[in-house]
Each structure stands twice: as structure tokens, then as C-alpha cells.
Image: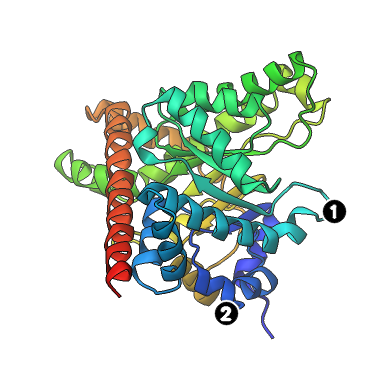
């Protein structure tokens, strides 16, 4: 039997997490199979994933009915459902978390409300609530890496909450996120608290960069760079990662058991049919990283992906690509800020749709 292609990725020091969750995948045993056969080592969720899960099945009807009888708000009903699913998934991944290097993987992520993306205090409060409600050491609370999200990330880390920083597009913001993580650890050390159990990832979004930049490249006569800007940005982010987490500043924390905040590649499905469906996975396999993939990308890689360590290939070319954009008058910082703004909106819409779906089901069940 041929070796599993997805599992091979782990041999290069990268962990594959699944960007999907619903009850069916857990009830059917399919998630356990993905852990056992494909070597999947964690899960990420977001409002769009939960909206699809709740709207497209009757698996949640009883819980919605119960929440309605208890006169809970739509948001409280949703987080009740989500916390329950996240707890189950975290328990399934606990053996991965408990492996030889304890806490290296096995994490399940749950997101604060996207409506809080620009609300520091609201984010901190909800991160605390969700962390307490889920009550699993192998859970990460997703906090957006917006400017107001930075102090929330620092506070959560200082309080011992594992954080998955989401919605990262730009290199400057990514570096600010590493600073928030390290500052949170430093604050915790200063308070005499342990830091050896804390884990965090920084989720760098890929394909959306190319979707926005590629049409501009044609206009500027740089069509040969299509489908390459996101990967160039990711490789430059990895350079920052290596510099920051090999610094003297972090070395002091490492002595106390601190783990580097790994880069996580997100939005790794190809949005452009002209780009191979495994491109974003293949190009960015490398040590000490995570890639969260939707089911169809995982299946595509299992079928025809090639696992090789390519993350640090063509670093000079990556620098050159970003320089060419600058010379052509394409402002990558402006683009990444626009992507962040759009990203917030793209998470708000499914979140509102999700609450509306719960409301619809609540009313239908009341009249059933």
C-alpha cells in the first residue's frame, strides 16, 4: 500500500489541521479516521463552517429547541452548540496532544464573535468566557490580528489562554502579532506564572492575497507573477518567524519552557481554477509550521499532492517579487489592510446568517 501523501507532510515538520467541523464527521468516525490514516493533528473552525453545519443538517435541532425553551438568545444558543462540538473534537485530539512532545499539537480552535474584531475589551471578555466554557487544555481561542486585537492577544496569553491569531495578511502586522505573543509571555513570567503549557499560532491567509493582486498584475504588465505573491509573502513571514523566535529576547522565555508561536497557513484552497488545487499546500511545506486545509484540499493532496520541504525555496525570488510590486506602484500594505477589512466582513456575514438560521429553526421548532 502506498504511503499516505497527507501523512508524509508531517515528516517535514509541518502539522496538517482540518479547517472543518460538524457533528456528522465526529458521529460517523470519519474524524477519527482522518487522525489515524491522514495524520490530521488539529482542527480550526469559523462562523462560516458552523453556519454550514447548522443550516444543512438536523443534527442541532434538539439543542436549538432546548435553548429556545430556556429562553436563550440566538448567540447563546450558538455558543452552546459550538462549545459542545469543540469539547468533543478536543477530546478526540487529546491523544495527539498527549504525544511524546506534550502540547506540540492536538489543538481545536474556536473563534470569538467576528463582531468584536475591532473591540479590544469585548474580545478579551469573550476569550475568557469561551476558554472557561470549553475547559480543555488543547483548545485555542481565535482572536483576529487586527490593531485592536493585538492588546487582546497579549492579555489572553498573559492569562494562560492558548490563542490562534486569525486574519493575518500583512508582514508588518504579523511581526506585531509575534510581539504581542512574546509580551504576553513576558508579563506572565513577571507575575510568577508558568509559561511552558501555552501554545499559539499565527494564521497567515494566502489565496485571498492572490485573488486581489492578480488582476492588478495584468494591468502593470506583471502577469508572469500571477499566483506567486501570496507564497512570496508567506516565505517572507517565515523569515520573520525565524528571526523573532531565534532572538535573545525569546531565548530567555525558551529557558522557561516557552514554545514559538508557529505560523499557520490558512486559506489554502485555490480560488483560481488556473492554479493547481494543491499549490498553496505544496509550496509551503516546512518545519515548525501548521497548514489548515478544507476537506476538498486534503482529499486533493491525498490523491495527487507531492510532499517536499519547499518553504525556503527561492527566498531571493520572493524578495524580488515584492520589490517588483513596489516598483510597479502596487502598495501591498494597502492591499493587506483592505483584505483585513473585507475579511472581517466575510466573517460577519456568515455569523449573522448563522444567528438568523438558528432563529428560523427556533421558530419552526416552536410551531412543530
- Closest to the observer, 329 or 8: 8
Q: Which mark is residue 156?
A: none
Percent across and percent down for residue 317 are: 44, 39
Q: How is the image coloured?
A: rainbow
Q: Nearer the viewer, mark 2 or mark 1?
A: 2
Q: Residue at x 34, y 61 (%)?
A: 275
Query: Which residue is more in the foreground, 93 or 247?
Result: 93
Relative to 30, is 157 above or below?
A: above
Above or below: residue 94 compared with residue 249: below
Indicate the secondary structure of the residue bearing disc 2: loop
Quarter occupied by the C terminus: bottom left
Q: Which of the two residues, 27 or 276, is positioned nearer the viewer here?
A: 27
Q: Do callouts 2 and 1 mark residues in contact (Cβ within 8 Å)?
A: no
Count residues near mark 2 (Cα–Cα under 10 Å), then give few for <14, some for 14-19, many for 20+: few
Is residue 26 visible in the rendered image? The answer is yes
Give the numbered dot on residue 100.
1
**Horizontal and vertical percent position of residue 313:** 55, 46
Residue at 33% from the left image edge and 59% from the top image edge: 358
Left or right of 10 on screen, residue 271:
left
Examine the rendered structure and indicate whether residue 16 appears above or below residue 191.
Answer: below
- Which numbered marker is on residue 28? 2
Q: Residue at x 39, y 26 (%)?
A: 119
Amino acid at each position: 500500500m502506498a504511503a499516505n501523501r497527507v501523512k508524509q507532510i508531517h515528516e517535514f515538520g509541518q502539522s496538517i489541521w482540518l479547517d472543518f467541523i460538524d457533528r456528522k464527521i465526529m458521529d460517523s468516525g470519519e474524524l477519527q479516521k482522518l487522525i489515524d490514516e491522514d495524520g490530521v493533528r488539529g482542527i480550526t473552525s469559523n462562523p462560516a463552517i458552523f453556519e454550514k453545519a447548522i443550516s444543512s443538517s438536523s443534527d442541532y435541532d434538539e439543542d436549538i429547541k432546548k435553548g429556545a425553551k430556556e429562553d436563550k438568545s440566538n448567540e447563546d444558543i450558538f455558543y452552546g452548540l459550538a462549545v459542545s462540538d469543540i469539547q468533543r473534537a478536543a477530546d478526540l485530539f487529546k491523544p495527539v496532544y498527549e504525544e511524546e512532545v506534550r502540547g506540540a499539537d492536538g489543538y481545536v480552535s474556536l473563534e470569538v464573535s467576528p463582531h468584536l474584531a475591532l473591540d479590544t475589551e469585548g474580545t478579551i471578555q469573550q476569550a475568557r468566557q469561551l476558554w472557561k466554557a470549553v475547559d480543555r487544555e488543547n483548545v485555542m481561542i481565535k482572536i483576529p490580528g487586527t490593531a485592536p486585537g493585538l492588546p487582546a492577544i497579549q492579555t489572553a496569553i498573559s492569562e494562560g489562554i492558548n490563542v490562534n491569531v486569525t486574519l493575518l495578511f500583512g508582514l508588518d502586522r504579523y511581526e506585531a502579532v509575534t510581539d504581542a505573543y512574546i509580551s504576553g509571555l513576558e508579563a506572565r513570567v513577571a507575575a510568577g506564572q508558568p509559561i511552558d503549557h501555552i501554545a499559539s499560532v499565527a494564521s497567515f491567509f494566502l489565496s485571498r492575497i492572490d485573488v486581489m493582486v492578480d488582476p492588478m498584475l495584468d494591468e502593470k504588465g506583471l502577469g508572469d507573477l500571477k499566483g506567486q505573491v501570496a507564497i512570496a509573502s508567506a516565505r517572507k513571514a517565515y523569515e520573520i518567524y525565524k528571526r523573532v523566535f531565534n532572538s535573545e529576547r525569546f531565548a530567555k522565555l525558551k529557558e522557561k519552557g516557552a514554545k514559538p508561536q508557529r505560523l499557520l497557513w490558512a486559506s489554502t484552497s485555490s480560488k483560481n481554477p488556473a492554479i493547481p488545487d494543491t499549490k498553496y499546500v505544496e509550496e509551503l511545506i516546512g518545519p515548525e509550521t501548521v497548514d489548515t486545509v478544507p476537506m476538498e484540499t486534503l482529499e486533493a493532496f491525498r490523491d495527487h499532492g507531492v510532499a517536499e520541504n519547499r518553504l525556503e525555496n527561492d527566498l531571493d525570488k520572493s524578495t524580488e517579487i515584492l520589490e517588483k510590486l513596489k516598483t510597479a506602484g502596487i502598495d501591498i500594505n494597502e492591499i493587506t489592510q483592505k483584505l483585513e477589512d473585507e475579511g472581517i466582513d466575510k466573517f460577519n456575514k456568515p455569523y449573522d446568517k448563522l444567528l438568523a438560521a438558528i432563529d428560523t429553526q427556533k421558530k419552526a421548532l416552536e410551531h412543530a
